[in-house]
Amino acid sequence: MTKQPKIDTREAIMAAARSTVQKDGYNALSFRDLAADVGIKSASVHHHFPTKPDLADALVKRYREDVTALLEPLADLPFAEAMNSYVALFRSFFSDCNQMCLGGMFSAEVTALPEAVNVSLRLFMDAHTSWIERVLAKKHDRMSADELNARAKAVFAALEGAQLVTRGRGGDPAYFDEIVKSYQAIGLLD
Amino acid sequence: MTKQPKIDTREAIMAAARSTVQKDGYNALSFRDLAADVGIKSASVHHHFPTKPDLADALVKRYREDVTALLEPLADLPFAEAMNSYVALFRSFFSDCNQMCLGGMFSAEVTALPEAVNVSLRLFMDAHTSWIERVLAKKHDRMSADELNARAKAVFAALEGAQLVTRGRGGDPAYFDEIVKSYQAIGLLD
DNA sequence: ACCTGAACACCGTTCAAGT
DNA sequence: ACCTGAACACCGTTCAAGT
């Protein structure tokens, strides 16, 4: 085994930045705080990520990769388990400092980001909706592609909204659960 | 009629601040930019709102009043019209610079705000859910109070989510409409 | 009461300089 | 390649000073 300490600093920056963004948002992210977290100076952060939007773009792309890797195996589960696991993913954010989906946070702060990051953000959301579409297709074999797509967008939007509203109320998982229960009662997650 | 130019500056600050927050967020709000918009110096803004959280709290409270005044007459409409008007309210944000509900924005940026503002934010969301509850009650006369309440929370969360996701995609109203159509198809808005 | 300039410690960014 | 100190124009906030 050869040593590979080269990308450690870059990875450490991304990990610290992602955590801060999910907790406090992109506009609250400070290169100086970030540098302090990692143990370097703020000017050094710019060596790895020239500008703040460059860091934002890297974060969204990595986040998309991570979520995709996490969702991939879940798509093979039976429908109810796949959907329950998906809901559980959105619920899991509250257990660590009332965090928020990075995609939802960037959607709120979208005007602070250049077009290139907006494109990455759309790709992230597409990854979600196409996963949902795939899962829904297993159950609704008579539904048209357009219907499945529209339904997937609705499921994603509804869960992002449940997370946002719950976060606004302090991140009480019980509040999130109550909303999800209503979604289930109406059949949105079926 | 006696002249009343006294609160004009304060009102102008609040109007400019509200617009900026709905477009770019609370963390992107600058007292210096705000002062320039109104035509005074940034130190003068602090005379009306000692700190930034003080301004945030005033904004949320006023926003709640405005939304309440706007929703009140709509509650007396027939069910379908009341609900359609409510959805139209969420849709209307995109027509002016891809804005966002101030409550949703503050929910995303909630960690930047002190507890006092969080309380005002909860009251704002309560105003929404109790209005929805009232409208739903007209149609579902056999539904229990708890069910109505849970359903109202779900409707609010779903619409906030539809707005958030649409904003993240550039604010195309057609995207919002597609999600709402799915909500309607499933019966969430009935 | 309402406004201001100046100061403070912050911020993202740049750049010449180090190793 | 990776890091740094110093500088720039920003930020929220404070305060003594004006009217």
Image: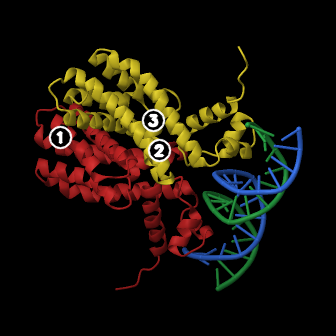
Chain colours: A red, B yellow, C green, D blue
> Would you name the residue on which mark 3 appears?
B101
Q: Earlier in the sequence, mark 3 or mark 2?
A: 3
In the structure shown, which secondary structural element does the residue marked by tag 1 occupy?
helix
In the structure shown, which secondary structural element does the residue marked by tag 2 occupy?
helix
Point out residue B166 in the picture as x, y percentages from the top left corner. Answer: 40, 36
User: What chain does mark 1 sit on?
Assistant: A
> Would you name the residue on which mark 1 appears?
A184
Tell me which corner region of the image, top left, top right, bottom left or bottom right, holds residue A42: bottom right
- The one nearer the camera, B108 or A79, is B108
Give the left or right position of residue B45, taking residue B122 as reference: right
In percent of the image, x 46 and y 36: which residue is there? B100
- Dots 3 and 2 on the same chain: yes
In the structure shown, which secondary structural element does the residue marked by tag 3 occupy?
loop
Give the left or right position of residue B104, taking residue B14 as reference: left
Q: Nearer the viewer, mark 2 or mark 1?
A: 2
- The one nearer the camera, B154 or B175, is B154
> Would you name the residue on which mark 2 appears?
B106
- In the drawing, what numbered circle is on residue A2? none
Mark 3 burial class by Cα count in 10 Å: few <14, some 14-19, many 20+: some
Above or below for B54 versus D3: above
